[in-house]
Image (cartoon, grey):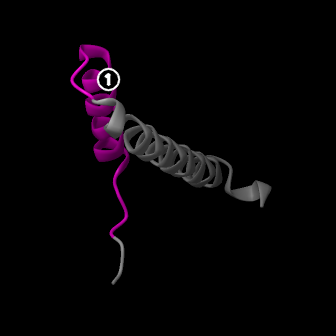
Amino acid sequence: MATKKIKYSEAMAEVEQILARLRSGQMSVDELSSNVARATQLIAECRTILSRTESEVERLINPDEE
């Protein structure tokens, strides 16, 4: 089964939802660990997306520096 690549905006929205639930007290202790793990995965994916995008933009702006 292939995993769909998540978009940056989708990942950030999910992180925001997790944070909102955490801050509001709606998250049980049982859910805490899995939600923190999920948020960590999402943040790592966002960093990867940002890094890749930065590299692509840099190549477009400075094509002669390859």
- Look at the image and give the residue range highlighted in magenta: 4-27
Q: Looking at the rendering, in which quadrant would you find the C terminus? A: bottom right
Residue 61 vs residue 16, the one in the foreground: 16
Q: Which of 41 and 47 is in front in this view?
A: 41
Say which amino acid is labelled 1: Leu
Q: Which quadrant of the structure image shows residue 47?
A: top right
Rendered residue at 68%/57% (across/down): 63
In the displayed structure, would residue 47 be above or below residue 21?
A: below
**Is residue 58 highlighted in magenta?**
no
Residue at the location (60% across, 47% down)? 51
Q: Nearer the viewer, residue 19 or 32?
A: 32
Residue extending farthest to the front is: 30
Query: In x, y percent, where is residue 50?
Result: 53, 44
Q: Mainly helix, strand or loop, the magenta region? A: helix
Q: How crowded is mark 1: few (under 14 residues within 10 Å), some or many (20 or more)?
A: some
Membership of 8 in magenta stretch: yes
Q: Where is residue 36 in the image (x, y as percent from the top left)?
A: 44, 37
Query: Helix or strand or loop: what does disc 1 sit on?
Result: helix
> Does 39 appear above or below 3?
above
In this picture, is 64 found above or below 37? below
Q: Which residue is the site of mark 1? A: 22
Asked whether, in this view, residue 52 is left or right of residue 43, the answer is right
Q: Residue at x 32, y 39 (%)?
A: 31
